[in-house]
Image (cartoon, helix red, strand yellow):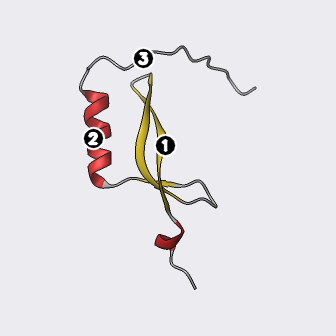
Amino acid sequence: MSSKREKLVEQKVTYTLIKEDKFYIVENVPARVNPETGEQFFSPQTVEHLQQIISSGRHPARVIQTPVFEFA
């Protein structure tokens, strides 16, 4: 019987967040990913760094436009 930890694969992922009506995308974030479910796990240090990136107000690497649809 294998443990949950053995199933996780280290890889870089794209992290997305909506905060105060703004959509943020952070690329190349280190994560442990379950290849069966796609569930992503981040270390506490990574989560702290993500929060710093988003709250810092620094200029992003690039800006993209994102269409928004309503499910009707």
The image quadrant that residue 7 belongs to is bottom right
Closest to the camera, between mark 2 and mark 3, is 3
Dot 1 or dot 3, earlier in sequence: 1
Asked if 39 appears above or below 6 in the picture, the reply is above
- Mark sitting on residue 62: 3
Q: Residue 18: horizontal and vertical position, in percent? A: 45, 30
In which quarter of the view is residue 39 placed?
Answer: bottom right
Q: Is residue 27 above or below residue 29?
A: above
Disc assigned to residue 25:
none
- Secondary structure of the residue carrying tag 1 is strand
Q: Which residue is rendered at x = 48% and y = 43% of the image?
A: 13
**Residue 63: which quarter of the image?**
top left
Estimate the spatial distance between the alpha carbons at disc 2 and disc 1, rounded to whole Å: 14 Å
How far apart are the alpha carbons under marks 2 and 3? 19 Å
Say which quadrant the C terminus sits in.
top right
Task: Please identify the residue farthest to the right as the structure is shown.
Answer: 72
Q: Residues within 10 Å of mark 2 (few under 14, many from 20)?
A: few
Q: Secondary structure at mark 2?
A: helix
Q: CA distance from mark 1 to mark 3?
A: 17 Å
**Residue 69 point in image, percent of width and height:** 67, 21
- Amino acid type at mark 1: Val
Which residue is rendered at x = 62% and y = 17% of the image? 67
Which of the labelled discs sits on residue 49, or is there none? 2
The residue shown at (50%, 64%) is: 8
Location of mark 1 (residue): 13
Please name the amino acid that badge 2 sits on: His
Q: Residue at x 23, y 26 (%)?
A: 56
- In primary-sequence order, the first of circles 2 and 1 is 1
Name the side, left or right, on which 45 lies relative to 21. left
